[in-house]
């Protein structure tokens, strides 16, 4: 009888523990998808707008208790309680959830000098669409009022001014009339990312990426030897907080299948609610180079899809860091191509890619060639967006990549297409 009672009690305890674990996992999963919104991201009063979860009462009922603390900062990174002057502001939202889980959201706000009535009066625009849309340029000119009305509704729909507009206005407000036309590396989105990187560094909330570290055979045998380093950046589908997702695809996936490389391979993971940060990735390279025995003249960069975009972008931001880059199914800004003309580049793309059109990669490669670079391009005729499967299965890729040294003329190896 007594043993039966003990067994029953133990069973109840185990069930309760299981329920606690399940509840925590559910809360954690929901927390990652929480969207925090402000009544307006562009405002004119000294009082900051009110914020709440987009999911509203559901959050408070399902995840109670929820503790939210919002701290505001001005453009100079000073903590403030009100917006005393026009310009950029940042809201750091700390969300404390049941179970001790803490999430942060980083939101850009902008105060205008006077109240703007976005829905009043006409908004005229001059726009160009990319080639291939089938829209006659004269139509764009004639239909300017209609296009302006659509943009106006996007800015001011239902009384809620878009967060994108706050980023746009903050960036333009900080731009000098003497500044050259912006490229992706210097546009308003990049300015916003730079500003937030600086604030988060100051607050001890800097973007840091967990990562997989694959060390080469023989790494431990020779403590004095320095090794090449390959930084692999995943696509948007592998975002999150589970490194097993990163292991399933691209270069990290090839290594999981048994591919041996004579190099340190670092595969970080981007959080679900963020984008790759060139600043944070550069910091990651510093940290990894200090932790492992890295040859600074043999640091290589490759990525797929969203990671392919940032492969171009990180090389453009820090061309001095890399011995060679391999962007796959990624796009970038041809106007900035001169910054990477001296880096060995081998780009890959699928001819049937309907996510990143092959023309995007071709335009970037052509732009680098026009400024004196000699990038290589492989177009797989039957591949779609997942052209990385064929790219990373190309043995010539690794021979070429590992032959390159920073600041040295490109070493052309067998199997590399002619520029």
Image: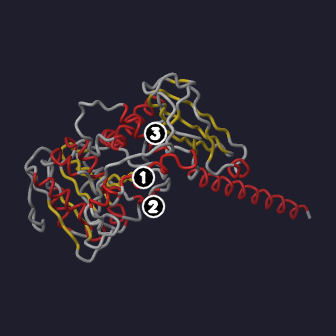
Q: Is residue 190 above or below residue 82?
A: below
Q: Report the mark closest to the observer, 3 or 2.
A: 3
Q: The residue tagged with tag 3: helix, strand or loop? A: helix
Q: The residue tagged with tag 1: helix, strand or loop? A: loop
Residue sticking out furthest to the right:
1
Q: Is residue 62 left or right of residue 341?
A: right
Q: Residue 46: where, in percent of width, then height?
A: 56, 25
Q: Nearer the viewer, residue 234 or 350?
A: 350
* Residue 326 figure quarter: bottom left
Cα–Cα gap, marks 1 and 3: 28 Å
Q: Are marks 1 and 2 in contact (CB under 8 Å)?
A: yes
Which one is earlier in the sequence, the residue at label 1 or at label 2?
Answer: 2
Which one is earlier in the sequence, the residue at label 1 or at label 3?
Answer: 3
Residue pointed to by mark 3:
166
Quarter of the image with the N terminus in it: bottom right
Q: Residue 103: where, in percent of width, then height?
A: 57, 43
Q: Is residue 11 above or below residue 272?
A: below
Q: Residue 180: where, in percent of width, then height?
A: 22, 36
Cα–Cα gap, marks 1 and 2: 9 Å
Q: Residue 298: where, in percent of width, then height?
A: 19, 48
Q: Are marks 1 and 3 in contact (CB under 8 Å)?
A: no
Mark 2 burial class by Cα count in 10 Å: few <14, some 14-19, many 20+: some
Q: Nearer the viewer, residue 368 or 415?
A: 368
Q: Nearer the viewer, residue 406 or 10?
A: 406
Which one is earlier in the sequence, the residue at label 3 or at label 2?
Answer: 3
Residue pointed to by mark 1:
269
Quarter of the image with the C terminus in it: bottom left
Cα–Cα gap, marks 3 and 2: 33 Å
Q: Is residue 372 above or below residue 192?
A: below
Q: Report the mark closest to the observer, 1 or 3.
A: 3
Q: The residue tagged with tag 2: helix, strand or loop? A: helix
Which numbered circle lies on residue 245? 2
């Amino acid at each position: 009888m007594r043993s039966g009672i003990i067994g029953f009690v133990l069973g109840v305890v185990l069930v309760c523990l299981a329920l606690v674990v399940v509840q925590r996992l559910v809360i954690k999963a929901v927390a990652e998808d929480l969207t925090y919104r402000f009544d307006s991201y562009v405002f004119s009063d000294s009082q900051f707008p009110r914020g709440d979860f987009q999911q509203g009462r559901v959050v408070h009922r399902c995840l109670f208790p929820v503790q939210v603390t919002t701290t505001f900062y001005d453009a100079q990174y000073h903590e403030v309680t009100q917006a005393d002057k026009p310009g950029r502001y940042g809201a750091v939202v700390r969300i404390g959830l049941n179970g001790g889980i803490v999430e942060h959201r980083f939101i850009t706000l902008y105060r205008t000098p006077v109240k703007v009535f976005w829905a009043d009066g006409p908004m005229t625009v001059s726009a160009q669409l990319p080639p291939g849309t089938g829209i006659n340029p004269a139509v764009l000119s004639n239909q300017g009022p209609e296009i302006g009305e659509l943009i106006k509704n996007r800015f001011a729909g239902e009384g809620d001014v878009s967060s994108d507009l706050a980023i746009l206005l903050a960036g333009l407000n900080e731009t000098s009339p003497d500044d050259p036309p912006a490229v992706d590396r210097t546009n308003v989105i990049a300015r916003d990312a730079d500003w937030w990187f600086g604030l988060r560094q100051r607050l001890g909330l800097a973007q840091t990426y967990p990562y997989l570290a694959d060390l080469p055979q023989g790494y431990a045998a020779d403590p004095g030897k320095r090794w090449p380093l390959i930084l692999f950046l995943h696509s948007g589908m592998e975002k999150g907080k589970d490194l097993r997702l990163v292991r399933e695809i691209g270069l990290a996936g090839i290594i999981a299948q048994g591919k041996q490389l004579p190099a340190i391979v670092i595969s970080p993971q981007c959080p679900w609610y963020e984008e790759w940060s060139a600043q944070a990735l550069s910091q990651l390279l510093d940290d990894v180079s200090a932790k492992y025995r890295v040859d600074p003249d043999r640091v290589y960069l490759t990525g797929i899809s969203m990671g392919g975009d940032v492969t171009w972008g990180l090389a453009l931001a820090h061309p001095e860091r890399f011995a060679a880059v391999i962007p796959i199914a990624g796009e970038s800004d041809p106007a900035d191509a001169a910054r990477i003309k001296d880096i060995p580049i081998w780009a890959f793309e699928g001819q049937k890619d309907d996510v990143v059109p092959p023309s995007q990669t071709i335009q970037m490669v052509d732009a680098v060639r026009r400024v004196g670079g000699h990038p290589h391009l492989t177009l797989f005729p039957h591949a779609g967006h997942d052209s990385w499967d064929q790219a990373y299965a190309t043995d010539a890729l690794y021979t070429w990549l590992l032959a390159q040294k920073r600041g040295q003329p490109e070493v052309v190896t067998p199997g590399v297409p002619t520029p």
